[in-house]
Amino acid sequence: MTALLLATALVALAEMGDKTQLLAFLLAARFRQPIPIVLGIFVATIINHAFAGAVGMYLNSLIGQDNMRWILGIGFLIMAAWLLIPDELDEQQEQDSSRFGVFGTTVIAFFLAEMGDKTQIATVALSAKYAADFVWVILGTTLGMMLANVPAVYLGNHFAQKLPIRWIHGIAASIFALIGILILLGKTGF
């Protein structure tokens, strides 16, 4: 029970103001379908945190901290640029033409966003400390993610009705670019 409670609290607090909350807001604003987004966050978190608990330490030692910093920094800059590409299709066509749909897009985006993130690293550490309670750690970290990100989905959906999507994308791109630059300069804990 300690592993579950500690993992939940640690991840919920770590996620406050994290990039995945921004991603939850963006997905909600873009797709305006909170239920598949919430389910996608849940599935991506379970997969990512199980992966982190099982092989996270090995990957970190294999890739190295400096290489991980470059991969994450460049990835954020690419995401910022992608956010600035305007959508030419109307909302219904965009949703219909999406290769993976709302759920699949959310699973992929959240899984990738969590790679190398502080909550993934926390999951690795907690899994190492509470190896006998691996399942409880994964459930706790997933619960913490949901506690932090589900409100962002519903707030994003609410604000999407009132704010222009281009404006949201511009702000998000700026934030992603700033995070990417800070990561490349080694000025963050990402």
Image (cartoon, rainbow, N blue to C red):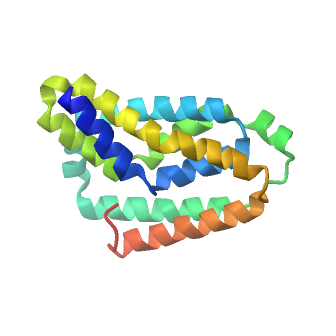
Q: How many marks?
A: 0
Residue 48 visible, this orientation: no
* 56 left or right of 20 in image: left
Query: Residue at 48% of width from left, 31% of height from top?
Result: 42
Tell me residue 109's x, y (percent): 54, 44
Q: Is residue 149 above or below residue 16?
A: above
Looking at the rendered image, the quarter that the N terminus falls into is: top left
Tell me residue 52's x, y (percent): 29, 38
Q: Quadrant of residue 9?
A: top left
Q: Quadrant of residue 84?
A: bottom right
* 115 left or right of 75 in image: left
Q: Is residue 89 above or below residue 108?
A: below
Looking at the rendered image, the quarter that the C terminus falls into is: bottom left
Q: Quadrant of residue 34?
A: top right
Residue 105 visible, this orientation: yes
Tell me residue 91's x, y (percent): 83, 44
Residue 126 or 9: which is nearer the viewer?
9
Q: Is residue 190 above or below residue 133?
A: below
Query: Residue at 61% of width from left, 38% of height from top?
Result: 105
Query: Residue at 14% of width from left, 32% of height from top?
Result: 130
Residue 18 or 159: which is nearer the viewer?
159
Residue 69 or 62: which is nearer the viewer?
69
Query: Residue at 60% of width from left, 43% of height from top?
Result: 153
* 79 left or right of 126 in image: right
Tell me residue 111's x, y (percent): 46, 40
